[in-house]
Image (spheres, rainbow, N blue to C red):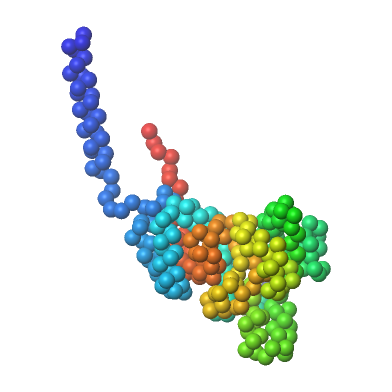
């Protein structure tokens, strides 16, 4: 019996090895994708990141280094961003104004939400950011802090009045540094919020310091960081946060060095490219 089985076992081992080498040989050649949901290979990163014309070369290099260090998480987060409402990522700045007719689709009156501390009545904000705003308020409260909501949605018409007021007070050149020209304010999106005193002293408060450290965890991003006036076009505003969602806020922190401007520029130029590299769900494998 033993003598009879021995050649069969040898044959089975040989056959298994032979099948395995055939499988390896039939696999497609070339670099493997960096993530199971996208067709990007490491070589494609040059086009994806270095190809962004609106971001300067040193920043692109820093982003590239961060992405190469952890592409898995980067593309996980890209996948999450693709599922979000695209209006969260609209780039609005001095070069990219909104139409005067743009009104966000889901404005709610903050008077109806008793949870928030507000410094005036009838403020409006988009419904889409409410759950995370509530979450951020609750987290602050657990630390014994209370966030004061001071300014939210501003219509195009309101921004015309605000801008004209500052021009009267400071002259046009100075007004352009502190107030957005109508159509060029993130407040028209209904996604931007000013907190506290709306001046530099907010950075010195416990609430201001806590938000600077923690707002990203709830999807809120500081739009105009300190020392980045040339990039954003605005003076440092420690009180002004914009909701971009949790995935994007994490991308901004971990890959874009806290620069919302660069992240939204990247997304404006590359969203279509990212969508076109998304692989469809893999079909159930037949046995
Ligand atoms: Zn603001």
Point out the residue furthest to the front here.
Answer: 204
In the rendered view, does 133 fall on the left or right side of 258? right
Name the residue: 57% across, 60% down: 249
86, 229: nearer the viewer: 229
List x then y, in percent, for residue 148: 75, 64
Q: Residue sitting at 81 percent across and 63 percent down?
A: 111
- How many badges with numbers are in the image? 0
Q: Residue at x 23, y 38 (%)?
A: 22
Q: Position of residue 8 (x, y in %)?
A: 20, 19
Q: Is residue 195 left or right of residue 20?
A: right
Q: Which quarter of the rendered picture does the C terminus lie within? A: top left
- Residue 10 occupies quadrant: top left
Residue 201, percent from left and from top: 70, 72
Q: Nearer the viewer, residue 120 or 100?
A: 120
Q: What residue is rendered at 64% in x and 76% in y?
A: 185
Q: Is residue 57 visible?
A: yes
269 vs 215, nearest the viewer: 215
> Is residue 33 shown above or below 208?
above
Q: Is residue 98 visible?
A: no
Taking 23 as reference, is 192 left or right? right
Residue 204 position within the rendered picture, expressed as x and y whole percent measured from the top left = 69, 68
């Amino acid at each position: 019996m033993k003598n009879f089985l021995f050649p069969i076992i040898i044959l089975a081992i040989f056959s298994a090895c032979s099948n395995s080498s055939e499988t390896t040989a039939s696999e497609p050649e070339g670099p493997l994708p960096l993530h199971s949901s996208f067709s990007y290979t490491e070589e494609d990163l040059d086009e994806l990141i270095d190809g962004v014309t609106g971001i300067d070369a040193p920043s692109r290099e820093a982003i590239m280094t961060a992405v190469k260090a952890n592409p898995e998480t980067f593309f996980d987060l890209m996948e999450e961003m693709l599922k979000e409402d695209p209006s969260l990522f609209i780039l609005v700045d001095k070069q990219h104004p909104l139409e005067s007719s743009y009104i966000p689709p889901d404005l709610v009156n903050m008077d109806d939400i008793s949870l928030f501390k507000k410094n005036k009545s009838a403020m409006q904000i988009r419904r889409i950011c409410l759950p995370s705003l509530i979450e951020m308020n609750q987290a602050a409260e657990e630390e014994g802090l209370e966030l004061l909501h001071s300014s939210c949605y501003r219509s195009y018409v309101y921004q015309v009045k605000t801008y004209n007021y500052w021009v009267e007070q400071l002259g046009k050149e100075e007004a352009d540094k502190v107030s957005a020209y109508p159509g060029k304010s993130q407040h028209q999106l209904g996604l931007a919020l000013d907190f506290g005193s709306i001046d530099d002293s907010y950075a010195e408060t416990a609430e201001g310091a806590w938000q600077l450290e923690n707002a990203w965890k709830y999807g809120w991003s500081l739009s105009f960081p300190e020392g980045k006036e040339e990039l954003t076009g605005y003076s440092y505003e420690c009180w002004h946060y914009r909701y971009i969602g949790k995935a994007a806020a994490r991308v901004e922190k971990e890959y874009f060095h806290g620069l919302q401007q660069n992240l939204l520029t990247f997304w404006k130029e590359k969203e279509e490219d990212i969508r076109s590299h998304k692989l469809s769900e893999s079909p159930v494998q037949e046995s």
